[in-house]
Image (cartoon, helix red, strand yellow):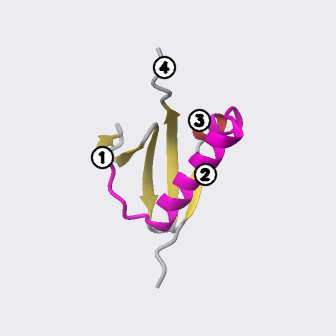
Amino acid sequence: MSLSYEFTISGEASRLLFGSTDRIRAKVEDIFSFLAKHPMTKGDFEELTPGGRILQVKVFENVIVTYWADHAVRELRILRCEVVDGKN
């Protein structure tokens, strides 16, 4: 039995994709696909929304993704994505 879910992305996360280089976009899409294939992946830390939802925050090298798994509809909801370049 496959646990693979579809992923959905918020407007905020989609703006990052549309405004990124091809290389960054491909990397981020790979991360989103990985998370959708492994929806039980725990984040490196969690955030709590004002409504009480627990969000997972996972760091992949220089990409930080905030998400939660909607098990009722088998979707991974990606709320935020940030690329940290490490340059000052």
Kind of element beneath mark 3: helix
Is the residue marked by circle 2 packed among few (<14), some (14-19), or many (20+) residues within 10 Å? Answer: few
Distance from Cα at disc 1 to Cα at disc 2: 19 Å
Q: Give the residue at mark 2.
A: 29
Q: Which residues are magenta?
A: 16-45
Residue type at mark 4: give it: Lys
Instruction: Tell which circle, 2 or 4, labels the residue nearer the N-terminal end.
Output: 2
Instruction: Tell which circle, 1 or 3, labels the residue nearer the N-terminal end.
Output: 3
The answer to whether mark 4 and mark 3 are in CB contact below 8 A is no
Q: In the image, residue 73 lies at what x, y percent?
A: 52, 68
Instruction: Tell which circle, 3 or 2, labels the residue nearer the N-terminal end.
Output: 3
Foreground mark, 2 or 4? 4
Residue type at mark 2: give it: Glu
Instruction: Tell which circle, 4 or 1, labels the residue nearer the N-terminal end.
Output: 1
Q: Give the residue at mark 4.
A: 87
Foreground mark, 4 or 1? 4
Which secondary structure type mostly characterizes the magenta part of the structure? helix
Q: In the image, residue 24 lies at what x, y percent?
A: 62, 40
Q: Give the residue at mark 1.
A: 44
Residue 12's disc number: 3
